Image (cartoon, rainbow, N blue to C red):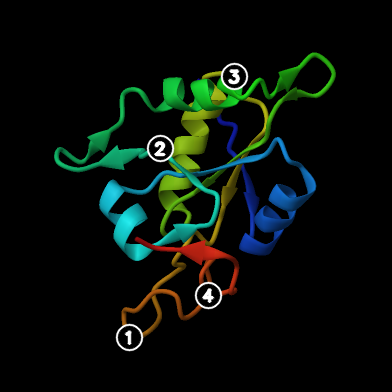
Amino acid sequence: MSNAEPIPLNPQQAYKMLEDDPRAILVDIRSSMEFLFVGHAKGAVHVPWIDEPDWTINPHFVTEIRKLVLGGVTCSEDEGCAPVILICRSGKRSLEAGKALIEADFHQVYHVDEGFEGELNDHHQRSSLNGWRYHGLPWEQC
């Protein structure tokens, strides 16, 4: 078992990587309800790490990410596979999910350490201290 962790990026660094490397994939790993109703980064692919109704770790998570990377033919002998950037609400689930990808032999794994909504403020509210949405990066909701 590896102690390796995904490389943390702040939201601006993640956005820049997505702009600079067309192979990079942003994967929103939050629940389906969070992805749809709270909103998500534009262009993010949704693959939940933990989802309703059982709130257990998705047993197919690594396989689904592998399909995203290989399905897009984003691996080459010279450059390896595409960078995978994970995002969740505040950076905690993406850290755990990133560890699972690294254990499954993914090499370019990153996570947005502030998440989409960021940390709670003193009034128990998100999106007021940090996070993708707080920084005004492109997002949408259903």
Residue annotated with mark 4: 134
Q: Which residue lies furthest to the top in this view?
A: 77
Residue annotated with mark 1: 123
Can you see residue 2? no
Relative vertical location of residue 114 with respect to residue 127 in this rendering, above or below: above
Q: Are marks 2 and 3 in contact (CB under 8 Å)?
A: no
Nearer to the camera, 14 or 56? 14
Nearer to the camera, 28 or 9? 28
Relative vertical location of residue 43 with respect to residue 38 in this rendering, above or below: above
Say whether disc 1 or disc 3 marks the residue closer to the N-terminus: 3
Mark 1 lies on a secondary structure that is loop
Q: Position of residue 67 (x, y in %)?
A: 50, 21
Residue annotated with mark 3: 70
Say whether disc 1 or disc 2 marks the residue closer to the N-terminus: 2
CA gap, disc 1 to disc 2? 30 Å
Say whether disc 1 or disc 4 marks the residue closer to the N-terminus: 1
Crowding at mark 4 (Cα within 10 Å: few <14, some 14-19, many 20+): some
Relative horizontal placement of residue 23, taking residue 28 as reference (left or right): right
Residue type for callout 1? His
Residue annotated with mark 2: 47
Q: Nearer the viewer, mark 3 or mark 4?
A: 3
Can you see residue 83? yes
